[in-house]
Amino acid sequence: MPIKEPDNQDDAALFRQAVGPVTPIRTGTVSPPRKPMPKPRARMAECDDADALSEFQRLLDDPAVTLEAGDTLRYRRDDVPLRIWQRLRRGHYSAQDELDLHGATAVQAEAMLRRFLNEARTSGLGCVRIIHGKGLGGSDVAPVLKNLVDRLLRQRNDIFAFHSAPSAQGGTGAVLVLLTRDRSKR
């Protein structure tokens, strides 16, 4: 059997009839203010960055792998042909750009080096020279920048090989670096 709808009643009257009696809220009552929500933070990313930084610092502080002032920096990927490696060792590649880290702190040098290598790679450079100095400033202190450069270069995937420069190009106070080609430039 169909339900009859009342005639001549407006919607408000129907609503009041359906809801029944209500108690009005007292006016003047204010709800408590909300605390502002803190800005979201990428806590896991911060933890990862801190872990990576502390690991990098541990590598720098490890006396078993610390280079001395006269030590030669050298690294070669397994896929680097011996002929290219020998030419790099002899200084036969000309540096297309150069970064001098003299006077920089370790934190500044790391930021400068990362930026320099990224720019060099995106510019399509094949060989660059990084001047880190020999670290003779402190007699019984290992050369900080030299060790930083060595460890940072070894960790990067865009480094093909590196070797301390020949004496005419800075000797053990500079390093020649062969970069892999940026695939987006091809």
Image (spheres, rainbow, N blue to C red):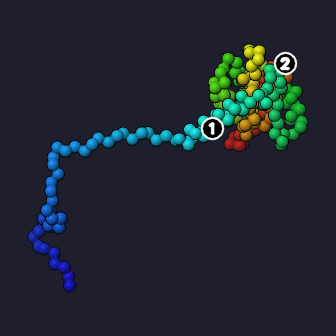
Q: Residue furthest left?
A: 8
- Image height of 127 relative to 102, above or below: below
Of 19 and 57, which appears nearest the observer?
Answer: 57
Earlier along the polypeptide chain: callout 1 or callout 2?
1
Which element carries disc 1, helix, strand or loop? helix
Residue 120 in view in this figure = no
Within 10 Å of disc 1 (Cα), the crowding (few <14, some 14-19, many 20+) is few
Where does residue 164 sit, x and y in percent of width and height?
82, 26
In this rendering, position of residue 82 left or right of residue 103:
right
Q: Which residue is drawn at 63% across and 24% down?
A: 108
Q: Which corner quadrant holds the N terminus?
A: bottom left
Where does residue 43 sit, x and y in percent of width and height?
53, 41
Where does residue 38 sit, x and y in percent of width and height?
42, 39
Mark 1 vs mark 2: give the one in front: 1
| Residue tagged 1 | 51
Amino acid under disc 1: Asp
- Image height of 141 relative to 79, above or below: above
Amino acid under disc 2: Ala
Q: Which disc, if any, is residue 168? A: 2
Residue 162 in view in this figure = yes
